[in-house]
Amino acid sequence: MIGVRLNTFNDNSGEPEQDANSALTELDKGLRSGKVGEQCEAIVRFPRLFEKYPFPILINSSFLKLADVFRMGNNFLRLWVLRVCQQSEKHLDKILNVDEFLRRVFSVLHSNDPVARALALRTLGAVAGIIPERQNVHHAIRRGLDSHDNVEVDAAIYATTRFAAHSNVFAVAMCNKLSDMVECESTGAERRAKLVRALRTVHGGAIRAEGVLKLLRSLLERFPSSSSVRAAITALTAIAADTVVHVPDQVELLLDIAMKDARSAVRRAALVGLRKLAEHAALWPAECIRQLVLCADTQHTHAMLCLEVMQILVQCPAVCAAAGSPPGGAASALRQYCGDAAVSADLRQAAVAAAVLTKIVVHCYEESLPVEGADLMLALESLVIATSFPSGQNNTKPLRMALQCLVQLSNAEPKVYAARTATVLGSQLQNCNWKYGGVRLASLLEALAALGGGTHCPESIAPAMPALLSALDSAAEQELDESNGGTSLVLLCTVIFQERAGKSLSCKINSAWEERVLSAVQTADGWTRYRVARAALRYGHHRLAADILKRLSEEAPSESAQRWLTALYRAAAADAKLIEEVYATYGMAARDPAAKAGACATALRRAARAVAAVATRYAAIARTAFHADDSTLRHLLISQHTYTQLSHFLDRITSSQPERSTELTTQEMKATTLEEMIALSASNAITKISTKLFDNPTTNPGITHRHLEAVLALVRACGGGAVWPRGVCAGRAGGALCRVSLTPAFRAPPAEHAATLPQSHKLALKLEGVVLPAVPLSKRQKQRQVKGVQITVTATPHPRTNEKTVELTNVPPILTAVQTVTPVRDFFSAQQLVSVNTAGLYTVAVEAAFVDEKGELWNTGPRTSIVIKAHEDPNSKGTVQNQRGRF
C-alpha cells in the first residue's frame, strides 16, 4: 500500500491537498460500488490523481484496480478504462506488475462478445508502449484482423498502428498482412482507407518503406475512388516525411496529382500533403517550386493552399536566397507570383502573399543580398488602407498580417522603412474613431508598440507622435468602450512611454506629458490603470507609475491586492526618488570633493565589495529563474554586468596598480529592444567615464578630484537607467518547480532527529520527486525542458552547544555527494548512502537543481533536510574490549 511519506511534499502553493492514500481509498470505494454511475465517476477521476501523485506505487496499484474493473465489468465500464489508459499514457511505464495487468486485460479476449474483444484490443493498443514485444498480444491482433466482425477488425487495425509505432519487429511482420488485406478485392473502400492509414506506421524503416510506397502508388491506379486516393496520398506523405529520403519523389507525385486530377477533393489532399512536406524545403528541387507557382496560377480554387505551402517553404534560407536573388538577375517565379498576388482583391490571399514576399526580402536584407523592397512596401501600405473599408469579410487577420510584415521590414532596414511605416500607421490612427475603433485601433497601436520597442526608437515612431497625442487627448475626453477592455488605452500609453524613454537617452525631457497621461487614464477601470502602471515601470517612468499605483492601493478590493499594490507603489516611489535626488546629491558633493579625499578610500573599497555582492546576487537570481522569459533573463544579466563594471571601476580607483581589467573589456552586450537600451545606458556610461578618466594622460595616480567627479558622474548615470523586467511588471511569481520527499522523514515532536545511525553503519537515504508543470508564460515563449535533475546531498555536523537554535552557515559539511538523475514522465528518484565518523547530531540536506536541454544548470531547489543522530555501536565496542581482554 501507499506509505504516508507520499504526503510529505514541500508544497509552497498554500492550497490544502488531499492525502494520496485517502484519494485512492475514496476512488476504490467508488470502483466497488454497485451503481454503474458511481463506478464511472471513480474511473474518470484517475487521470487527475495520476497528475497529482505520479508515483509508481500509486499508479501500479491504481491500474491493477482498473484492470480488475475491465475484467469483471461491462462494456460501458471497459470503455472508460480505455479512456483512462489513453489519457494517462505518460504514466504507463510506472506500472510495476505489467504481467498481472496484462493478464487481467488479456482475459477479456476470450469473451464471446466481439465488442468486449474489440475494447480489449484497443486497450492493449493504448498500453503498447510497455508491452511492445509480447508475442501473445501480436498473435491476438493478427487474429483480430481475421475476424468477421467489423468492430473487432477496426480495433485490431488501431492496435496494429499503436504496436507498430513501438516495435519494429511487429511492424515488419504485419506489413505483408496489411498489404494483402489492402489488395484484396473484397475489402470495402472504407476498410481499405483505414488499412492504408495503418500502413503509415508499419513500413519498418527506410528500406522497408520502399515496398510500401510502391504498393501505395499502385493503389492510386487500381482503386481510383476519391476516398482511397486521398487515404493513399496521406499515407505516402507521412512515410516520405518520416523517411526524408523519399521527399523529392513524393513532391513530384503530389504536384502531378494537383495539376492533372479533375477532382477538387483529391487536388486539395495533394496540396495538404505538399504543405506537410514543405517542412523539408531544402530537399525540394527548384523545378518543383516553379511547378507549385504554375499550379497556384492555374488552380484559382486552391490558390490559398498553394500560398500556404509557399509560406512554409520560405522558412528555409536557401529558398529565400534563390527567390530573392536568382542567378540570371530577373525576378524568380515565386517572387513574381507573390508580388502580383499581394495586390489581389482577395485580402486574405494578398496578406499571405505579402508575408511570403516579406520573408524573402527580409532574409536578403539580413544576408546583405541585393534586393529591392519598394514594391513590397507599396503593397503593404495598400493592404493596410484596403482593410479599413468594409468588404463583406473579416479584415482583422489580413490587417494584422500586413502590420507584422511592416514591422519585420522596418526592423530589417529601419533607415528606409521605419519612418514611412510610422507615417502610414499614424494616418490610419487618425481615421479611427477612438470610442468605436475596436480591434483595428488596437492592432494599429500594437504595431506601433512593436515598432517603438526596437533599438531605433524614438526615430522609428516620431512621425506618428502627433496622431498618438491627439488620440491621448481623445481618450481623456471620452469614456472607454468596455468591449476592448481598455487594451487600446494601454497600448497607446505604452507607445508614448517608449518614445519618451528613447528621447530621454539623448536629452532631458519635460515632465508635463505625464499629466496628459494621468488625465487620460483617470476614468479607466482599475485593471487598465494597473496595466498602464506596469508599462510605465518597464520603460523607467517610475514617478508616473507611483502616482497611479498609489491611487490603486487606496481603491484595492481586497487585503492581498492592497498589499501587492502598496509594495509596488513603494518600490516605484523609491526608484523615482533615487533618480530625482541624484542630481541634488551630485551638486552638493561636487562643491568640495578634495576635502573628503582622505577618508574616501576605505569607503570606496567597502562600496566596491558591496556592489560586487549585488552582482553576484543578480547572477544567482538569474540561475534560479528557470521558467522566466528571455527578456527577464536578459535584464538580470545586464544588471549583473553593470554592477560588475561598477565594482571593477571602484577597485581600479582604490588600487595601487590601476590596470585595465580584461574581464569586462572582452565582454560586450548589445541591446535588442528599447528596454535593453535603457537598461544598458548605465553600462555604456560607465565605459565612457572609465575611458575618459583612465585613458587621459593628465590623470594623476591616487585619488584626486577627477576620480571623485568620475565616481559621482557614475552614480548619477546608474541612477537613471532603472527599468523593471517584464516578468516583474506582470507580477509573475516563480512558485515551486518540483516537490520532493525524503525517506526517512522527520519524526513528530518531541523527537529531535529523523533516524539514529551507528558509526559502523551507513544510512540509506532515498529521495523521490515530481517535476511540476510550468505555468504558461505566453504563447510565443518556448518553455525550457527538464532533461535532468542534479541532486546534491550534504551532511553537516552540529556544533556542541547547549543552545536549541543552531546556525550551520559557517560549518563546512563533512560529506558532499552529487548525482544527476533523468526524470521519467516528470518523476525522479535517487538514493545515497550517508556515513559519519564521530558521534553527534548531523543535518543531512538534499538540494535539487534542474538541467535543461542545453545542459545548463539552474539552481531551482527545493532544499529539504533531516537531522540524524550518530552514536557509537555498543556491540562493536564490546567485541573490541573482549578481544583485548583475552590477550
Image (cartoon, rainbow, N blue to C red):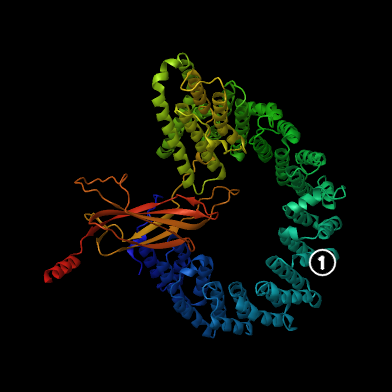
Q: 271 and 467: which one is in front? A: 271
For badge 1, the amino acid type reads Ile
Residue 472 in picture, x, y percent from top left: 63, 28
Residue 648 in picture, x, y percent from top left: 48, 32
Residue 161 sits in quarter: bottom right
Residue at the (62%, 39%) spot, across then down: 672
Residue 846 vertical placement versus 405 (above, below): below
* Residue 527 in view in this figure: no
Residue 182 vertical placement versus 813 (above, below): below
Residue 465 in picture, x, y percent from top left: 68, 28
Q: Is residue 775 left or right of residue 415?
A: left
Q: Is residue 662 left or right of residue 275?
A: left
Q: How many marks?
A: 1
Q: Which residue is mark 1?
A: 257
Residue 524 vertical placement versus 826 (above, below): above
State which quarter of the image contains the C terminus: bottom left
Q: Is residue 560 left or right of residue 284?
A: left
Residue at the (61%, 37%) spot, across then down: 671
Residue 779 vertical placement versus 870 (above, below): above
